[in-house]
Amino acid sequence: MSSLRSGLQDSFRPVSSLHWPRKTPDQARWILFVIFYAVIANIPYWIASREFGFLDHRGWFCVQFVTVGLLALVVRPILSAVLLFSVMAADLVYAVCESYSLSIQECLSNMDAIHAFSGHRRIAAAAVFLLVLLLAASTLLLRSATVRKSDRRRAAVCLIAFAVLILSTDVLTTWRATGHFPVPMGRRAAHDGTELGMRNVPRFARISIIRLVRQELGDAVVRAYERKGATAPMPVDSASAEALRLVNLAPGNSSRELPNLVIVVVESWGLATDSPLQQALVQPYLQPGVLAGYEVVQGTVPFYGSTIPGEARELCGSSIGFHLLNATANDLKGCLPSRLATLGYHNIALHGMNGNMFRRSTWYKTIGFQETWFNDQFRQQRLPDCPGAFAGTCDADVAAWIGRRLAKDDPHPYFIHWMTLNSHLPVLVPSTLASGAPCSPALSLSPNTALCSWYQLVANVHQSVSELAMSGLGRPTVFVIVGDHTPPFVEPAVRDRFSRSVVPYVLLIPRPNNSSQDRMLARSFAAPPGKPARFSAQTP
């Protein structure tokens, strides 16, 4: 009976008085340690990827976080916190560089562009930064000293096994899908069929730091050669050069005889590989009103890098790219603004964002523009802003502003360079246009998608420019409408709908009064640049 009584007393003993094994909390800690470095540390990247449109082929899990976790088992907690913060920051920087075709130097030198973000994305950027700080600081609570030596070995084995698992999975899935092993893909990778196939293969592992270091070393070599004068910008094909060849501006002509020249570089207008989508975008230039006054030339030119290289291509006809930002006036004397100024042109540069973005307020003047207009000046003219990845002046209103400026019968011709803004990716879904072009199944476009919003914003630019061309202008005007680079969509399937080597252009060449009104100039989108083909076509 005494033993039974003792057993019953033990059964009803308060839970707080029970003696739990002391090793259970330690076990939970080392498991949490593994989950933190394998999974939780990736959360800031996942949030930033969704908010800022990073390429999703880069992988879900960063292998370098696993490396930091292994080091955290043997180094001081403060050092592991610094290492994790640095690796997380580098991971995000590389994502920006790769997604938007920028070098590391270009990314870091334009960090102030965050002030030009829309309010929502400024909040998202601040949230990501604070989360990175929080996760880095939380490593101080995961002190390696609290994980017993036997459990450290278990944690190390689990982290290594996780890294091997995701890397092996990527190798096998890539091999099965493409017949090739994974190759490093970055902004300088060749745009061949192998890479395109790999972009559609789901990836689990990111190896950002190795790629970041490799990219920076390559950029450093290029910069060293350029400082020594061993390399110089190479001539490249441009839509503006083709327009000037067709117009043939002669130095002997008087200012009254020279036409205005308007170059419109359309943000993220890439060449759609499916013809219906591409033709739908340029349809505004095939209206009877446009064809009555202009010959229409369509074609493609190669693109190199992101937006600034696209502007450099059209303004200078060279591969100077981002070195445009640091070039001297002497370096740029062969570019269009300087050349046209000698013919009597008045040069104007327009962009709907703040002039500090990529230092346009500085290099626009260095290259030879007498007037520069940015968001602040347009606001003073009561032009409205449009939301987007970068909030700024609405493209359609800038086109109308150009029309009012060119309506004057000035004694000198105008050269206007306009870098559009609203179609900069990532775009808002749905777009905020009051009457955007319909996204029809015939164009393989689904409403309320990023591709639909992009289509509506780019079509809005083309419609605005076509209306500008048909307005009452003070003198004949040559229009060059050209893309800067392929749209950097997140989804590989959407990116594959655009060429990765060329961008389209449309030229509007004023007709002589006695010319036929049903003729259209065109170049096949598949034809190499520099050899336009002319043929007759019926007006719509």
Image: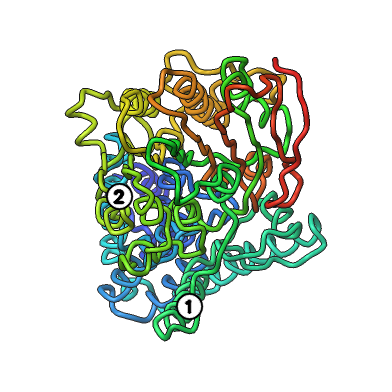
429 versus 420 height, above or below = above
Q: Amino acid at mark 1?
A: Val
Cα gap from disc 1 to disc 2, whole angstroms: 29 Å
Query: Which disc is residue 515 wearing?
Result: none
**In the current view of this chain or complex, which residue is farthest to the left?**
380
Residue of label 2: 369
Query: Is disc 1 surrounded by few (<14), some (14 to 19) or many (20+) residues within 10 Å?
Result: few
Quadrant in the picture for residue 396: top left
Of 268 and 79, the residue lying toward us: 268
Query: Which disc is residue 222 wearing?
Result: 1
Where, quadrant-wise, is the C terminus in this rendering?
top right
Q: Is residue 131 visible?
A: no
Quadrant in the picture for residue 11: top left
User: Percent x, y for residue 222?
Assistant: 48, 78
Q: Amino acid at mark 2?
A: Phe
Of 398 and 495, the residue lying toward us: 398
Q: Secondary structure at mark 2?
A: loop
Q: Is residue 304 visible?
A: yes
